[in-house]
Image (cartoon, helix red, strand yellow):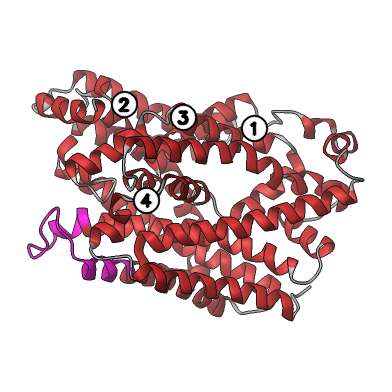
């Protein structure tokens, strides 16, 4: 079933709004500091919403919708709940450290402090690996949006990539972080409206407000359980650790939201807002997905459940709104990634390649040029999506595996208790985590919880144990750095 003209108009207006915001944000950028970290003046409520919507993509409405269909409530327990807890328990720690790093060391990239904390080699290993893997990750997301456009509108894959990638290319290049966070806010409003509409319509089909409680009696018993194997307690604990690292800065784009805050109090409030949204909003967002087995029984492909519900229950125009929200989620994550990766290239990589670009200095022109070129490469990779096939999927899974091992030396490196852990511990933890990931992928008998958690556990132990025995000549210098961000 294809969308009608009214739905296409709604989607077209959504894309037009993104461009208008990009043009508006263009005039808010006077230098690279504005472009990458909003001049350190990002309002806490805008930062919190941006942190929230940048933390997940349209996969929620496809892959997670399938798990909600087959495994019920457990998707909330191991995903949304663990993220919310991870952010809230550390709202006074890592968000505060990130903003102090900007204020005291003038960082614009979340990797800039690594040269001072470890050494140049460690920083470059982390920067290059992250940039290369994100190149493929973002390219895959353009292709995913194009596939959605193809399913609902019949637009070909290359044209779909040009529409989603091209529009994002323009507004990110024009507006920098201001464009990203303002479009994040607009996209959140679209998502909010679409999610509430779906929630209300599904409730009506279930007989009203009591459907929230009677729904579970009509589903298999395990669908109402907090844990549903293989997504059991062990799996949830593993994800709690992963999300603790990722959402406190292990995902570089999320660290940028805290770095861009004007002060420590604003960074903490932003983290709290994002954490609360993760605890509350998914309960509404996932409800139609939990109800899908009742409204769409025996669905052959559960990953299509949300899309099928949309087409089944909503009138013209509102279907376009929901589809626009799917694009919004993915575009929010990709644009956020691109802005942060551009900061890493401009601030951490280019000064070590060209002597013309001085460390700690970056022009607005170079910032925009880097953003444009990186985005173009991600679009070109998306065009070659079929050539990568399974390899692309492998690279994406490798990126997921790298989030933890790279995040450990980043975040643990900010804690005074690990001041003895130097470059050998940092690089060793990354390498050990990667090797463990490769090994676990080739052991069929492992539980899902162990497969997910072992690379992280090995990385963590390596960082701590090697750090304990490492002879670090810069311990006093590191102690001064950590003391400067620990105390007000």
Other residues around mark 4 within 10 Å, as few (<14) / some (14–19) / many (≥20): many
Query: Residue at point 27% right, 30% down?
Result: 414
Label 3, label 1: how far apart the Cα atoms are = 21 Å
> Viewer-nearest of labels 4 and 2?
4
Q: Are marks 3 and 2 in contact (CB under 8 Å)?
A: no
Q: In the structure shown, which secondary structural element does the residue marked by tag 2 occupy?
A: helix
Q: How many marks?
A: 4
Q: Residue beneath label 4, please?
A: 42
- Quadrant in the picture for residue 104: top left
Q: Is residue 229 shown in magenta?
A: no
Vertical position of residue 262 compared to residue 94: above or below: below
Extent of the magenta region: 347-371
- Mark seen at residue 462: 2
Q: 465 or 12: nearer the eye?
A: 12
Q: Are marks 2 and 1 in contact (CB under 8 Å)?
A: no
Query: Residue at point 29% right, 65% down?
Result: 29
Q: Residue beneath label 3, please?
A: 454
Residue 282 in the figure: left or right of residue 399: right
Q: 234 or 355: nearer the eye?
A: 355
Q: 445 or 69: nearer the eye?
A: 69
Q: Work out which quarter of the rendered image holds the C terminus and state it.
A: top left
Q: Residue beneath label 1, please?
A: 77
């Amino acid at each position: 079933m294809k969308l009608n003209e009214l739905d296409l108009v709604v989607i077209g207006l959504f894309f037009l709004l993104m461009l208008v915001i990009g043009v508006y944000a263009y005039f808010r950028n006077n230098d690279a500091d504005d472009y990458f970290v909003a001049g350190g003046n990002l309002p806490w409520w805008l930062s919190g919403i941006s942190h929230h919507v940048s933390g997940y993509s349209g996969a929620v409405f496809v892959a997670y919708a399938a798990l909600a269909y087959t495994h019920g409530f457990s998707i909330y327990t191991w995903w949304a709940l663990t993220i919310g807890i991870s952010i809230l328990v550390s709202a006074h720690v890592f968000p505060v450290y990130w903003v102090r790093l900007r204020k005291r060391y003038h960082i614009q990239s979340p990797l800039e402090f690594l040269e001072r904390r470890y050494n140049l080699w460690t920083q470059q290993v982390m920067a290059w690996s992250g940039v290369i893997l994100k190149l493929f990750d973002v390219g895959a997301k353009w292709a995913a949006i194009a596939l959605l456009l193809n399913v609902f509108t019949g637009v070909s894959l290359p044209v779909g990539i040009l529409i989603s990638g091209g529009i994002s290319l323009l507004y990110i290049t024009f507006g920098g972080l201001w464009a990203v966070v303002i479009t994040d806010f607009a996209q959140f409003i679209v998502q909010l409206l679409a999610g509430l509409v779906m929630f209300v319509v599904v409730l009506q089909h279930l007989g009203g407000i009591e459907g929230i409680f009677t729904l579970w009696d009509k589903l298999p018993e395990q669908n109402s359980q907090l844990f549903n194997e293989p997504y059991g307690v062990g799996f949830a604990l593993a994800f709690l650790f992963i999300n603790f690292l990722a959402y406190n800065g292990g995902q570089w784009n999320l660290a940028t939201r805290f770095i861009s805050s004007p002060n420590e109090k604003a960074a903490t409030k932003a983290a709290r807002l994002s954490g609360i949204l993760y605890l509350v909003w998914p309960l509404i967002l996932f409800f139609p997905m939990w109800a899908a087995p009742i409204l769409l029984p025996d669905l052959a492909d559960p990953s299509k459940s949300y899309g099928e519900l949309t087409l089944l229950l909503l009138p013209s125009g509102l279907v376009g709104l929901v589809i626009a929200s799917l694009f919004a989620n993915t575009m929010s994550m990709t644009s956020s990634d691109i802005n942060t990766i551009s900061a890493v290239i401009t601030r951490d990589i280019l000064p070590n390649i060209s002597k013309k670009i001085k460390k700690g200095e970056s022009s607005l022109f170079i910032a925009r040029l880097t953003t444009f070129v990186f985005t173009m490469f991600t679009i070109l990779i998306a065009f070659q999506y079929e050539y990568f096939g399974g390899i692309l999927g492998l690279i994406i899974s490798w990126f997921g595996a790298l989030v933890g091992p790279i995040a450990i030396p980043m975040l643990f490196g900010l804690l005074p208790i690990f001041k003895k852990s130097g470059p050998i511990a940092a690089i060793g933890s990354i390498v050990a985590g990667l090797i463990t990931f490769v090994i676990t992928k080739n052991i069929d008998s492992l539980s899902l919880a162990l497969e997910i958690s072992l690379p992280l556990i090995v990385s963590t132990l390596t960082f701590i144990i090697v750090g304990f025995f490492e002879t670090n000549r810069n311990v006093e210098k590191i102690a001064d750095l950590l003391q400067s961000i620990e105390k007000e």
